[in-house]
Amino acid sequence: MRLSKIKLAGFKSFVDSTTIPFPSNLVGVVGPNGCGKSNVIDAVRWVMGESSASRLRGDSITDVIFNGSSSRKPVGAASVELLFDNTDTTLEGQYAKYAEIAIRREVARDGISNYYLNGTRCRRKDITGVFLGTGLGPRSYSIIEQGMISRMIEAKPEEMRTFIEEAAGISKYKERRRETSNRIKRTRENLDRLADVLDEVEKQIKHLDRQAKTAERYGRLKDDERKTAAELLALRLRDLDARAQESATILSDKETALEALIAEQRKTEAKIEDARVTQSDRSDEFNAVQARYYKSGSEIARIEQTIEHAHELRERQQHDFELAKQGAGEIAGHINKDETEIAQLQLTLNALVPGLEDAKTREQDSHRSLEEAEQALAEWQQRWDEYSNTSSDTQQTRQVEQIRIEQLRSRLGSLTERRRKLEQFQKTANPQELKTEFEKLVANEQRKRQAREEFQRAITDISSNVQKLREQDKKLSKLVDERRAALLAAQAKYASLEAVQKAALGESDESIQGWLESSGLKSKSRVAQAIEVEEGWQTAVETVLGDYLQAVCITDVASATSSLSSLKNGNVTLLVDDASLDADMSGRDSLATKVSNAPAAVFEILRTVRIANSLNEALAIRERLGGETDDGSVITADGVWLSRSWLRVCRDEDSQSGVLSREHTMRRLKDDIREIQARSDSAAKLLKDGRLRLRQLEERREKLQIDANALLDEYSEVKTKLDTARYRMDQANARQEAISEENSDIEKEQFTAEEQTRTSQLQFE
């Protein structure tokens, strides 16, 4: 078998449909870097079943699809087909009759891959099964890459054994044995699971039985309750009727009494109305009399007020008249007295007028003499005050200067003593030692601070990485749980379908299974498991084949007849799996064209059945069946099977319906389970590696934190010492500056005091 041609479309750099021919056994692909040489071998690996994206130089399986460029848009799917020349019949078995084998794989953007073998859709397992024992495969030794020779030379015995087994062609048998062992293991697990399910179902049945009995008892008690409630309501209704009659009698008596009281009330209301009319007339008369009374009273009050006002006005006028008469008498007396005094003063004035001029002259002379004397006295008093002040100021200045000289001398002595003490303290203080100690502490503090900052940066980086790893761990944990849940759901669905499928194919019959096992036929597949049916024609094939779907495919009937005596009961059908007859020998319009990989007997059965796309077309074909010699029939895709003399329609929803569809679903589920298992294992490995890295980082962070805490304690101690030394140094510097300033002030003050002393001494002298 030789690779003769490769067809690529949308695969990596082969965006357009490309065909690469291989005309001989030795072909080389050459070209510059980036022209796509490696993509050719990646295409070969990919078609032969490679599922690892990393081996195809990508991150996911969809990376093999052309993602577009600056001048081309991306495509939605990739397809690669390998054509092998099988003229030398290297492939045996069912593929020996094909002169050319075509294997094709397609993938879309959703990541789902489809495999085709000679144009027929198949499983990945079928593709890998074709190359088992031939030395070909996605990871076999026939594809020699960089480092492959050294790996084969340095291979361990177990690895070399794998290469030798593949070259010897026995790897496919080991693979089948492994699959059989896995199938047996899964069967046992399913049996255990089925036993658990049966126990659980039995418990549920018992529980439901108890609930059913409880429900029956509840129903009986409920009926009794309804009957008792009805009787109680009847008794209450009877009592209520009796009470209603008594109440009706009492109500009639009360109504009679009420009517009598109402008549009496009407009579009383009439009397009240007459009295109210009389009261209204009397009230009008009373109001008229009262109005006249009030009018007369107001008139009397007005007249009385007028009379009283007249009396008061008269008395006030009389009093004013008396006062006027008294004032006139007093004015007349004052006029007489003033006239008498004026006459006396006129007489005195006439006597004093002659000596008035002499008195004025003497007064002027006396006034001038007084002013001269007062001026002389003021001058003498001023001279005396000046002399007294000068004498007093001199004596006072002498005393003040003497006291000031004593104070200045005392101050000079205290300043000298203070300066001596400051010079002595300045000699005893040594700021150079404090400065040296401070510089050492500053250098040590800087080193500790730098080390602390480095620790903090390292801890921050590790904490950031730890946070990222924790978030990654959460995402991976969620992903692992989701994939495990999906895997369990797929496995459970597959187990249930497998159980139903076994029941449908008769594999649950222990007698038949025992006979097949004793005959060495238990590992043989059933017809339903072997054949491939075109989509949409499963119902038609199931209708025609019926029990033949449970038939066991064998290679020789004669070898099975020797053990027929051990089969006591049960029905079993054996069909020879002869690949010499296929659908190509049948008519183009027969049901056999919709089936592949079927035994010859199945093709014989299906060859006589024609196909129709609709019931009307089937009826038209049925009319033409009469002229044929064979017992022909026609069937539609939905399972309506008819001939000239009979018609059969299968619409039963039994355990055997949908066998082929179920088998197809099981195959797809098996591939999905394998793919989900691989993804789950990959995610679990990533989760494990991430948690290991997280644990290492956390341990490293804890160690760094401990070292950082110790360093922080040392830094705090050095910082405290540095602050103390800085404070002492600042105090010493401040003290030195204060001493210098104080010495300067003392010198200035001493100089000033000496000057003031000399000045005061001169002033005192």
Image (spheres, rainbow, N blue to C red):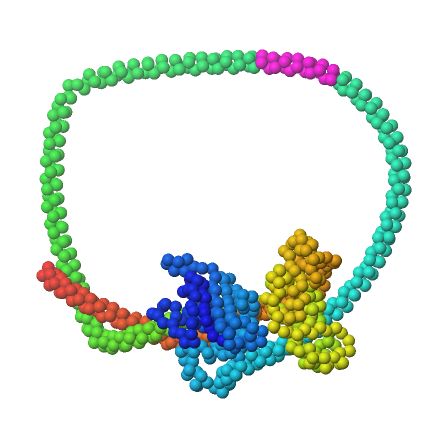
- Residue at 76% x, 67% y is 205
Q: Is residue 464 visible?
A: no
Instruction: Decide which of 306, 31 is in the foreground and name it.
Output: 31
Instruction: Decide which of 326, 152 is in the foreground and name it.
Output: 152
Instruction: Decide which of 267, 670 is in the foreground and name it.
Output: 670
Q: Quadrant of residue 535?
A: bottom right
Per the image, is 148 magenta? no
- Residue at 88% x, 50% y is 231
Residue 310 relative to residue 726: left or right: right
Rendered position, 697 above or below 69: below
Classify the position of the C terminus by image quarter.
bottom left
Look at the magenta stretch and give its main secondary structure: helix
Rendered position, 330 above or below 763: above
The magenta segment: 280-304
Q: Is residue 373 visible?
A: yes
- Residue at 32% x, 16% y is 337
- Residue at 87% x, 43% y is 240
| Total numbered circles | 0
Residue 321 appears at what percent x and percent y? 45, 12
Instruction: Decide which of 95, 70 is in the foreground and name it.
Output: 95
